[in-house]
Amino acid sequence: MTEMWTAGDLARAAGVTVRTLHHYDEIGLLVPGERTSTGHRRYTADDVRRLYRIRALRQLGVPLDRIAAALDAGDLRAVITAQLADLDTRARHLDELRRQVRGLLDTADPHPGRLLGALERMSLLDSYLTEVQRDALAARRDELGEQRIDRLRAEWAGLVAELHRHQEADTPVTDPDVQRIVARWDEIGAAFQTGDQGTDQRVRERLGDLWRDHGDRIADDLDQRAGWRLADVLAYLGAARAAR
């Protein structure tokens, strides 16, 4: 006689809940091979094997709808390959988030209000970029590597301070040292570009939209941290670029 499993027995053996089995039945992912005259579910050995495959794919993070399609089509390799690509994307996002959080803790003013302001700016930036644009920028940051990114950020902060000193001293924007700073500023910015002209142009446009919509608020927060007006330094930078 073929061995049959009740929902309770199978749930205990497989480490899932009866509710999970009922849900799988409702969505057609795991339909029991038989039902009793009173409507109780009875699972066959084939059902048990299918459940363990479902669990294995779920542990890989594969969504239920993709599991159903993969099992029914017998194309497990394709769904696992697609899931690996998803995991690679998530890993890049997590690496970037880790860098952002570390940089936030290393450089941000410890005052809670300022910390929240920095977090808000990070969230705002993500909201203005598409997933494709974020992925392209994250891939470029992976190419640069964490140590080089840290060096470039530190160098850029030094350039900001130098430019501010020149702006405060009313140094002509044609001054060779000012022009050197501006050239290096632009080189650092170019290092973070993706290399795809279309993507880089759209990112610049979206960053322009971000600054147009929220620039005053962002600048106010940064001004408080720096102790001087960022807008004045950026205007000086723009004038120096125009004087090339």
Image (tube, rainbow, N blue to C red):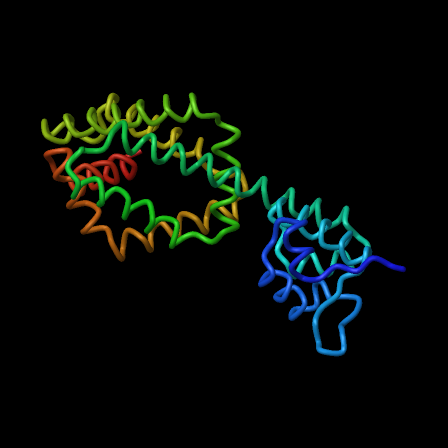
- In the rendered image, the residue lying farthest to the bottom is 37
Specify the quadrant that holds the C terminus: top left
- Please report the residue visible at 64 percent of the width from the left and 58 percent of the height from the top: 64
Query: Viewed as shown, does residue 153 lie left or right of 61?
Result: left
Figure check: 145 above or below 224: above
Residue situated in front as seen by the camera: 240 or 194:
194
Residue situated in front as seen by the camera: 91 or 164:
91
Give coordinates of residue 71: x percent, y percent: 77, 56
- Please report the residue visible at 14 percent of the width from the left and 26 percent of the height from the top: 165
- Please report the residue visible at 67 percent of the width from the left and 62 percent of the height from the top: 7
Residue situated in front as seen by the camera: 54 or 186:
54
Give coordinates of residue 140: x percent, y percent: 50, 35
Query: Looking at the rendering, which quadrant does residue 74 occupy?
Result: bottom right
Specify the quadrant that holds the N terminus: bottom right
- Please report the residue visible at 69 percent of the width from the left and 53 percent of the height from the top: 54
Query: Viewed as shown, does residue 213 lie left or right of 199?
Result: left
Query: Viewed as shown, does residue 13 lie left or right of 122?
Result: right
Give coordinates of residue 47: x percent, y percent: 77, 58
